[in-house]
Amino acid sequence: MEKAVVITGMTKQYSNDRGIQNIDLTIDQGEIVGILGPNGAGKTTLLKCLTGLTSPDSGKVELFGVELQSNYKEAIRPVGALIGPAVAYENMSPYKNLKMISRLYSGITDKDIELVLQQTGLTPYKDEKISSFSMGMKQRFGIASALISKPRLIILDEPTNGLDIDGLLLLRKTIQEISSYSGVTFVISSHHISELEKLCNRFCFLIQGAASFYEAGSEPLEDVYVKKIGVAGR
Amino acid sequence: MNTIRANSLNEMQKLLTKKSTKLYLLAALLIPVLTKLLVNNLFLTDWMALPAENINFTLLDLFVTIFIPLFIFISATDLFTGERERGTLFQVRPISRMELFLSKIIAISIFSLIVLLLEWLAVMISSAVFDKTFNLTNIPSSLGAFIVSWLPLIVLTAFAVTLALLVQSSVLAISSMIVLYLIMMFIPYVLPSSLYLLPSSYLDWYMQWLSDVSLRWILQTVTYLCSSFALFFSVGYYMFNRKEA
């Protein structure tokens, strides 16, 4: 099976001693991997290093066999990501924002934009300025901007932040549909453990910057989390 | 190349949605027309009795030394410092840092050219309507003057971008740009020998093109402007490339 992500010996330390240390992680094409850990454990740092938004101090990232550091454009082309707050130009509509993103890829049509807006429930608001959106609607736009390029790997950092129940259900349905029909790989970081449990087939626990793994099984994820954090928690 | 073109279009679209950009485009059209209207209909002083062409170049001077630099400062602050503040500067997209940096500079430069050309168009139309001495043969030289004015403005763009990347807040960025620009404009009055070392001194270099053009002087100036651009561009890109999201 093709490897979607291969991280080798990745370390990123900040001046406040937070960060990640010597992470090795391999994710197969089609997997849905959940990243769990307490606040400050390094989840966002890991995802930022994985997408080139931050340079690791050491280590290597390969996305579909292409090294990220030396060939950023090619490596990142099949990746869609929502990391932190949704990146949007707020004095423009979601449609115009997505149109701008689509210019950086080939083969994204207006129909694709309409489809993504539909998938995220933004069709009725597609011509409204994003500045008038609630936090949840901005988050929906963030998810739409991660999906627009028809990526093979989707990285979502706290995608459920600010989402209402309808948005949460829509997100779950979209991830399940995309994963089952297109075999897209997902890496999702979230504090909503029950949501991750419903979606993911493998989990990566980050505790004090180090990673440990768990395959989805019969034991409730919450119990696994408590055991791991209880043993090595902050 | 396609990525640079696509992202330059994106950056221009972002600038165009800003009220300040629309205001500048409108001002480029209205200021020359209103000035001509006032000069021709309301005033009869000696200064206003200057030949029409002098008024045209006074207008160009006003734009290249005040209006467009201010537009460049606002745009550079918005596309760099502002985007960094809003968290939109770096995204997970197939575009390299160099392409992103270059396309932002291209977008600002193209808009400053558009403002210049709109102003030229407004000057020519208002001259044709209001000036009795308007002569079609002046069109090529005036268009040339407006176009050559673009080169020092590109250098000023690279200077503004470098400053925008040096500071963390938009307010500090725009105020430091304006203060430094004013200092650069006034230094030659105190230290006349510094005149040729400051990029701001070349904003009105179009005047040299209108008089007896010395090829040597043009080559020297173009080389100096290109070197200044290369210096600001390199320092700016170095800082841009080191930034993390």
Image (tube, rainbow, N blue to C red):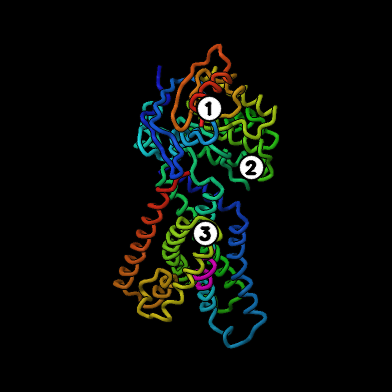
Chain of the residue under label 2: A
Q: The magenta stretch spans which residues?
A: B61-70
Choose the circle earlier in sequence order: 2 or 1: 1
Closer to the eye: label 3 or 1: 1
- Judge left or right: residue B8 versus residue A196: left
Amino acid type shown at disc 2: Ser
Q: Residue at x 69, y 40 (%)?
A: A134
Residue A179 in picture, x, y percent from top left? 54, 20
Amino acid type shown at disc 1: Leu
Q: Which mark is residue A93?
A: 2
The kind of secondary structure element at disc 2 is: loop
Residue position for label 3: B114
Graded by Cα atoms within 10 Å as few (under 14), some (14 to 19) or many (20 or more), the crowding at tag 1 reads: many
Closer to the eye: label 2 or 1: 1
Residue position for label 1: A36
Q: Is residue B63 magenta?
A: yes
Closer to the eye: label 2 or 3: 2
| Quarter of the figure with the N terminus of chain B | top left
Residue A135 in picture, x, y percent from top left? 66, 39
